[in-house]
Image (cartoon, helix red, strand yellow):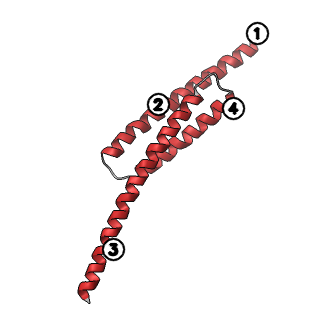
Amino acid sequence: MIGLRLQQRENTHREFERLRKQSQQLRLEFVRSELEISSTLATFANNRHFSDVLQECSYLTAAKGYHTAVKLLSEAESGEARRALEIEVERLRATLAQTRTDRISRSRDRAGALRHP
C-alpha cells in the first residue's frame, strides 16, 4: 500500500514536471510569434505609403504585442531561448521608439506646412 502511494506520487511528480516544461516551451513559442507579428506591424506603422489610420493602428498593436512579450518573458525561466528572445524584444523596442519619433516629426512637419503655406 505504501509502495503504491509512493509510486503514484512519483508518477504525479513526473507528470507535473512534463507539463511544466511543456508550458515553458509553449510560452516561449507564443512570445516568439508575438514578436514576429509585432515586428511586422511595426514596419507598417512606419510606412508613409499607408494611411495615417493604418499606421497608428499598426503602431498601437505592435506596442501592445511588445508589452505582452515583455510580461510573458519576465515570467519565463532563464535559458538560451529566453536570452535570444530578449534580444528580439530589445530590437522591437528600438523599432517602436524610432517609429514613434518619426511619426511625431512627420506630424510636426505637416502642422508646420499647414500654418505656413
In this rendered view, identify the residue nearer to me: 19 or 78: 19
Which one is in front in this view, the residue at disc 3 or the one at disc 1? 3
Residue 64 occupies quadrant? top right
Sequence-first tag of 3 and 4: 3
Identity, as a three-letter code, of the amino acid under mark 1: Pro
Q: How far apart, in angstroms, are the residues tagged by discs 3 and 2? A: 44 Å
Task: Say if 5 sits above or below 66 in the image.
Answer: below
Q: Is 6 on the left or on the right of 99, as rendered? A: left
Identity, as a three-letter code, of the amino acid under mark 4: Val
Which one is in front in this view, the residue at disc 3 or the one at disc 2? 3
Q: Are marks 4 and 2 in contact (CB under 8 Å)?
A: no
Residue 117's mark?
1
Residue named by callout 2: 94
Residue 53's mark?
4
Give the secondary structure at mark 2.
Answer: helix
Identity, as a three-letter code, of the amino acid under mark 3: Thr
Identity, as a three-letter code, of the amino acid under mark 2: Ala
Crowding near pointer 3: few (<14 within 10 Å), some, many (20+)? Answer: few
Residue 92 placement (x, y as % from top left): 47, 34
Q: How far apart, in angstroms, are the residues tagged by discs 3 and 4? A: 52 Å
Q: Quadrant of the N terminus?
A: bottom left
Q: How far apart, in angstroms, are the residues tagged by discs 1 and 4? A: 24 Å
Residue 110 placement (x, y as % from top left): 69, 18
Q: Residue at x 45, y 46 (%)?
A: 31
Sequence-first tag of 1 and 4: 4
Residue 12's mark?
3
Sequence-first tag of 3 and 2: 3
Which one is in front in this view, the residue at disc 4 or the one at disc 2? 4
Q: Residue at x 30, y 48 (%)?
A: 79
Q: Residue furthest bottom?
A: 1
